Image (cartoon, rainbow, N blue to C red):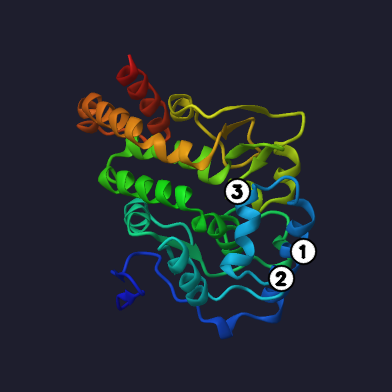
């Protein structure tokens, strides 16, 4: 595959890179977008973050048409300098972080089927675009996301730090809450693209606590169920302002992990080792 030339960047080919050929979307694809969009339009008001809701018209979403990535990127560039590049699905950490570092968000170009409206194991276009893209127009969040990518790119080959970065991503970008004057609201894309979790996360069952970087980094997560704990930020600068502390913590973890990196660690043991290294680094 040839490099993709975006307005601001020349993106070198990477595993999972794709093209969005808009003419290949079927009538069922467009119907899936329409149905999911209508469903979220019913459940998001009063629950989704104000910045997210205000961003939907700014990024040009239409209720009856899958977004064109080029048009989407054009709007984002004018707002915060971000762009969107199509991918096949989840990509490896190294290219993912490098793209974020350049203010490029990798989004799946394919959309789920009508039979998968209520559950999908891997993120598709609706999750990636409808869930993630609006907040890329919010300056403080956009700055945090780029800084997150810069740090991730620095440690992309470090399995224990990548695990800790995944926890921060999970409890903020995917499943974060924000305290607004009217009450808690949702900014995490994993919630905003799931009507079931929109209702659940603000209901009586889960625990909701103020965002604390060290606590987030100590908290493992599961992908196969609703969360038991959600972290709430005060504003989007909270995320950006945590980056200097994150830099110090990751440097300490790197120092403590040298002996472990010299040994083979089974994939299923990485999370536990990462937690122990973090705790040792914080003491």
Mark with earlier residue (3, 1) = 1
x, y percent for residue 167: 46, 36
- Specify the farthest residue to the bottom: 23
x, y percent for residue 217: 44, 29
Under circle 1, the secondary element is helix
Q: Nearer the viewer, residue 93 or 259?
A: 93
Q: Nearer the viewer, mark 3 or mark 1?
A: 1
> Vertical placement of 145 versus 111: above or below?
above
- Specify the farthest residue to the top: 283
Residue placed at 60% from the left, 59% from the top? 55
x, y percent for residue 45: 75, 51
Q: Is residue 94 left or right of residue 111?
A: left
Residue 206 falls in image quadrant: top right
Under circle 3, the secondary element is helix
x, y percent for residue 274: 37, 28
Disc 3: which residue = 190
Disc 1: which residue = 38
Position of the C terminus, as image quadrant, is top left
Q: Nearer the viewer, residue 151 or 75?
A: 75
Crowding at mark 2 (Cα within 10 Å: few <14, some 14-19, many 20+): some
Mark with earlier residue (1, 2) = 1
Q: How many marks?
A: 3
Q: Which mark is residue 63?
A: 2
> Vertical placement of 60 versus 193: above or below?
below
């Amino acid at each position: 595959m040839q490099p993709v030339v975006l307005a601001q960047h020349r993106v070198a080919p990477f595993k999972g890179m794709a093209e969005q050929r808009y003419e290949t979307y079927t009538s069922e694809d467009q119907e899936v977008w329409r149905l999911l969009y209508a469903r979220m339009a019913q459940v998001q008001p009063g629950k989704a973050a104000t910045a997210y809701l205000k961003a939907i018209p700014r990024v040009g979403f239409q209720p009856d048409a899958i977004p064109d990535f080029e048009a989407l990127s054009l709007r984002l560039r004018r707002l915060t300098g971000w762009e969107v590049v199509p991918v096949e699905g989840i990509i490896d950490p190294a290219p993912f972080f490098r793209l974020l570092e350049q203010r490029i968000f990798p989004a799946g170009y394919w959309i789920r089927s009508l039979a998968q409206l209520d559950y999908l194991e891997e993120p598709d276009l609706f999750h990636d675009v409808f869930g993630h893209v609006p907040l890329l127009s919010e300056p403080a969040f956009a700055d945090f996301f780029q800084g997150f990518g810069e740090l991730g790119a620095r440690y992309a080959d470090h399995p224990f730090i990548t695990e800790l970065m995944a926890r921060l991503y999970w409890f903020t970008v995917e499943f974060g809450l924000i305290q607004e004057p009217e009450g808690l609201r949702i900014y995490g894309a994993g919630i905003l693209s799931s009507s079931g979790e929109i209702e659940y996360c603000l209901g009586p069952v889960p625990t909701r606590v103020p965002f604390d970087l060290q606590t987030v980094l100590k908290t493992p997560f599961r992908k196969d169920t609703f969360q038991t704990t959600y972290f709430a930020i005060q504003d989007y600068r909270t995320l950006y302002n945590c980056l200097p502390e994150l830099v110090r913590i990751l440097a300490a973890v790197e120092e403590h992990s040298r002996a472990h990196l010299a040994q083979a660690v089974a994939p299923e043991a990485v999370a536990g080792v990462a937690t122990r290294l973090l705790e040792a680094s914080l003491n």
